[in-house]
Image (tube, coloured by chain):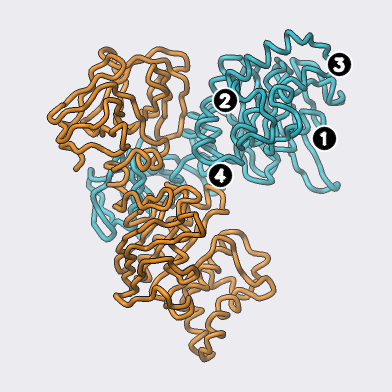
Chain colours: A cyan, B orange
Amino acid sequence: MATVELQGVTKIFDKTVKALDQISFTVQNGKFFVLLGPTGAGKTTTLRAIAGLEKIDQGKILFDEEDVTTAQPAARDTAFVFQQYSLYPHYKVYDNLAFPLRSPLRKVPEQEINSKVTKIAEMLKISSKLNNKATELSGGEMQRVAIGRALVREPNIYLMDEPLSSLDAKLRESLRVELKNIQLNLGATILYVTHDQAEATTMADQIGVLENGKIAQIGSPEEIYNNPNSIYVANRLGSPKINIVKNSVLSSIVSTNAYQLGLRPEHIKLGQGDLSASVKTVEALGAETVVELEYNGIEMLSLYQGSFDGQRGDNIKFAIDQSKVLFFNEDGNKMQ
Amino acid sequence: MAEIEIKNLHKSFSDFIAVKNSNLVIENKEFFVLLGPSGCGKTTTLRMIAGLELPTSGNIFLDKEDVSYLRASQRDIAFVFQLFALYPHLNVRNNLAFPLKMQGYSKQDIDTRVMEAAKLLRIDHILKSKTSGLAGGDRQRVALGRALVRRPKAFLMDEPLGTLDAEFRELMCLELRKLHDDIDATTVYVTHDQQEAMSMADRIAVMNEGEILQADSPNIIYNKPKTKFVANFIGSPGMNFMPINQKISPNQNNVSVAGTIINIPTQKDGSSSDQNFLGVRPENLKLVSENGIKGNIFGVEYLGSRKILTVETVVGNIKIRVDSDTNVQINEQVQFNVLNNNQIVFDGSTDKALISEFIS
């Protein structure tokens, strides 16, 4: 596998629309890199540019420091996993998995194909389905096969385009744990794009947050969550969402010349301290409770561990973990 | 103002039983959620309350009045569907006014009610826009507004947020709940999404295969589920189940799981089976340095305010919820034990929770 580097990659559609605007980042060999952004931020275009399916207008793409900017897709040797599992319906699972290895260009002996297919099928828990036709599988199983078909090869990089987004919540949760485990144990290089923040923070070694074709921030999940460099980034991670409030709202607690403050819900501690607010809504989520407070005329979300014993209209004391408050200027950028 | 009661409600479609002899009382002003996997009978139940489907047997009462066989239009109830059924060629105002025009309200009444609903939903600034150009959330608000203008006794909603993305759904949940609190109507809401149910409901009825398994507040449903199905369906991740290969007797207060002694709340009744399950929520487990169940870390999921660990053990993969600064790596050997006395033993033959000092 390879270290993949993008340097100032720009892609313009219809001569005016900048889909990618000076994108630079590096996926280190053996690491899991997630590009996080909403629809239209440029995620899929980035993957296609790396695979060679999209010609870029400016910048360079390097595989292990070798310039592949103008190389043909086949010469780049990448493996793509799409959102919609595109399997061969008339083939058995085994043959779907073996297909990439049987390419005449690769000339892999059948014995080696067999051992690779068996190993990957075991990792993805589809060993018992190897003789089923692709059409006889559930959605989750089909996506396992689609991922497996990429993993049987050892390309320069695996490019994954929201591969879990069409699955239901429980299945998505278990597959993301498995995919991360497999990646770590294989030492695979993965560039994974998604709009789902939980997928990003649970699997990534590094996250790149995309905003309108530009990279807004790159860092580990912890860095991006704890130290976002703009309000845009702060809003992308965290559920419930971070509270962004005007400086004046908390002036009695935090003294600063920052224009706006960011306060994560878990850093508002209910039932302690000497600030007082009224409870607007209570959402019991089981292990934790989201309590919406009204303080100084504004609404703030707080996160309480366990079951919260209170209801709408109650007055409640709270404290703020001051060391965790984030400061932003008028443009929404972080202040030091 | 509406109390909805269903009594021995039963619905079958030829040999298929969609709803089995169900009983429920939904109280006035309650936000009530029918929750379950697809095919569990939740939508059929809702459609019978609305009058869109007639029961095979049993009764439905709206404020004590038997409405079981009344037509939908004769019940003072508004239905909000999953899909945005809006008129694309009409602007927002006319979409909102449409149901009132059909019922022959005066222009003045219509204007008052449309403005009232629009303000409540914060769409009064887009009344003149065509609905075809609206964002998903605004379209959903218009759909809600069209139900709201009728000022019905009860709102029935069938997965109204099903098509929205996660970030938006979270926001809309909060708004729907506030709207409910502001208008004092009874809401019956159908969903398969446990998080939606937990975040909005006063009470949740969990359904499976046409049966109501449990109807309780979110906290009770989560902490004291009466069956293994409910325990597993609720929570993200769901409850852990560890096999116990022994019969449970009254007054028993510990069990052996994979050779490790685990404390449990003192049991009141015994089990009928000798193959049972210990149910523990991920946040009720903790990592320990000795005398715990041993395992190998398979996954570490960082989620900002917390981490979820997946531990491979001889009793299966176990999820543990820990603080986000807990430092463990995939492939590391760990041990864990219970954090408190909130465990539930499920009888292996009935899947029901056994009565103990924790759960009655």
Give the chain letter at badge 4.
A
Q: Marks 3 and 1, Cα distance to the nearest angstrom?
A: 23 Å
Say which residue label 2 marks.
A179
Counting residues from the N terminus, which is met first, the one under dot 3 or under dot 4? Answer: 3
> In terms of image quadrants, where is residue A151?
top right
Chain designation of label 1: A
Secondary structure beneath disc 3?
Answer: loop
Which residue extends farthest front? Answer: B15
Among numbered discs 1 and 2, the one appearing first in the sequence: 1
Return the chain for callout 3: A
- Quickly name the residue at label 3: A105
Q: Could you tell me how far apart the alpha carbons at marks 2 and 4 are, in whole angstroms?
A: 28 Å
Q: Residue at x 50, y 49 (%)?
A: B38
- Tag 2, which secondary structure? helix
Label 1 and label 2 in one chain: yes
Position of residue B49 relative to residue A227, above or below, is below
- 2 or 4: tag closer to the N-terminus: 2
At label 1, counting other C-alpha atoms closer than 10 Å, the crowd grade (few under 14, some 14-19, many 20 or more) is some
The residue that appears at 23% across and 18% down in the rendered structure is B261
What amino acid type should be assigned to the residue bearing mark 1?
Glu
Disc 3 and disc 2: Cα gap in Å? 28 Å
Quadrant occupied by the N terminus of chain A: top right
Question: Can you say whether B181 is above or below B91 in the image?
Answer: above
- Residue A188 vs residue B261: left or right? right
Q: Kindly identify the amino acid type of the residue bearing the numbered disc 3.
A: Leu
Q: Is residue A39 above or below residue B48?
A: above
| Secondary structure at numbered mark 4 | helix
